[in-house]
Image (cartoon, grey):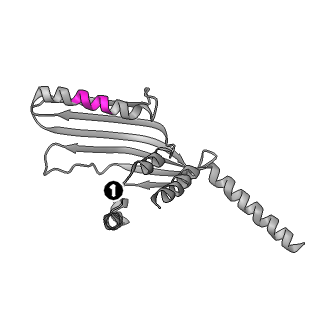
Amino acid sequence: AMILFFLCVLFGIFLLFCIFILLLSFEIKIKNLDFMIENINKKHVNDNFIFTLYLKLFRIPVFKVDVTKATFRKNKVKIEINKMKQKIRQKEKKLDFKMIAQLKKLKINFKSLNFVVNIGTEDAAVTALTTGVLATSIGIALRNILNLNKDNYFKVIPIYKNKNLLKIDFNCMFEIKLINIIYTILALKKVSK
C-alpha cells in the first residue's frame, strides 16, 4: 500500500510538472536598441538599450530580469559569448535546410514590433533604389511573422544628405512557449544526428 501511495504521489508530481511546462512561456521585450553607422570611429550601439525577460505562468509574470549594458559588463557576458563562438568554430557545424525548418516551427508570437531604418548614401539615386529594395525585403520577411498595424510597423526612411548613413531603431516584444523551445531542441538534436 505504501509503494502504491508513493507511485501515485510521484505520478501526480510528474503530471503537475508537465502541466507547468505546457503553461509556462517566456516574453522578451527589447527597448531602445539603436544602431547607427555614420563614421567608423564613432560608437555604433547606444548604451540605453534594455532587454527584459519575463517568465509567465497563466500569462501572469512570475519572474522578471532586466538586462542593460551595465549588466552585460558586470556579468562578463562577452567572455561567455566568445567561448560559445569558439566552440561553434571548433565543431564547424553547418546549418542545413532540415535545421532551418525545425527552427521555423518555434512559433514565436510577436506582440509588438517597431522597426525604423534610416538609410542614406552619397548618391541620391542609389539611396532611393536602396530604400525601395530594403522596404520590400523587410515587408516580405515580416508578412508571415505578424500583422502590421499601428502597434506593429516598420519604416524605411531615405536620408538625402550626400553621406553614407545607416541608423536602425528597434523595439519589440515577443513570447515563446517553453514547450515549443523543448520540442525544437529535441528536434534539432534528432536532425543533427
For residue 66, side relative to residue 134 (left or right):
right
In this view, the residue farthest toward the bottom is 2
Residue for point 49% across, 43% down: 108
On whether residue 136 falls in the magenta region, the answer is yes
Residue for point 9% across, 33% down: 122
Quadrant of the image containing the N terminus: bottom right
Residue 143 figure quarter: top left
In this view, the residue farthest toward the right is 1
Q: Amino acid at mark 1?
A: Lys
Secondary element at image label 1: helix
- The image shows a total of numbered marks equal to 1
Residue for point 45% across, 59% down: 192
Q: Which residue is mark 1?
A: 69
For residue 97, side relative to residue 180 (left or right):
left
Asked if residue 80 is positioned above or below residue 152 in the image, the reply reads below
The spot of residue 68 in percent (x, y) is 37, 55
On whether residue 162 falls in the magenta region, the answer is no
The span picked out in magenta is 131-137
The spot of residue 189 in percent (x, y) is 49, 59
Residue 126 figure quarter: top left
Main SS, magenta residues? helix
